[in-house]
Amino acid sequence: MARDINDIQRDIERTRRQLASTLDELAIRTKPQALAADAKVEAQAKLQDPQVQKILAGVGVAVVGLVTLVVMRNRKRTKDLKEIQRLLAGRA
């Protein structure tokens, strides 16, 4: 059965409206503000996950431990250097 020209034109117009709507939606979604808002919502949702909170706490403890270790090594190294300087000053 052949389609009526009016039916074809209505289909074309409907398709155009759908395409225009899709393009409008894509334009809205790709705005930097919308992308930033979406990323913020996703990050907040991830941070509410208990598993993620445990991982972040572990990373925090590891960082504090490493900083403490580095500070203690530097203090020991400084103390050792001062002792060497003292010994060398006593020889002169």
Image (cartoon, rainbow, N blue to C red):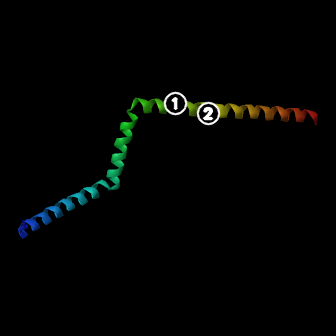
Rendered location of residue 39, percent (x, y)? 37, 46
Query: 26 or 16: nearer the eye?
Result: 16
* Nearer the observer, 76 or 15: 15
| Residues at circles 1 and 2 in contact by the CB criterion of under 8 Å | no
- 34 relative to 17, above or below: above
Residue 53 % position (x, y) = 44, 31
- The mark tally for this picture is 2
Disc 1 is placed on an element classified as: helix
Q: Is residue 13 left or right of residue 65?
A: left
Left or right of residue 75: residue 41: left
Q: Residue 58 shows which numbered tag?
A: 1
Image position of 61 (left or right of 74): left
What is the C-alpha distance between the residues marked 1 and 2?
A: 12 Å
Residue 31 location, quadrant: bottom left
Query: Which quarter shows the C terminus?
Result: top right
Residue extending furthest toward the bottom: 5
Quarter location, residue 43:
top left
Q: Which mark is residue 66?
A: 2
Q: Quadrant of the N terminus?
A: bottom left
User: Could you tell me the amino acid type at mark 1?
Assistant: Gly
- Labels 1 and 2: the sequence-earlier one: 1
Q: Residue at image x 43%, y 30%?
A: 51
Image location of residue 21, percent across then percent down: 20, 58
Residue under the image location 93 percent in, 34 percent down: 91
Residue 89 image position (x, y, % from top left) = 89, 35
Label 2 element class? helix
Figure check: 92 above or below 17: above
Crowding at mark 2 (Cα within 10 Å: few <14, some 14-19, many 20+):
few
The circle on residue 89 is none
Q: Residues within 10 Å of mark 1 (few under 14, many from 20)?
A: few
* Amino acid residing under circle 2: Leu
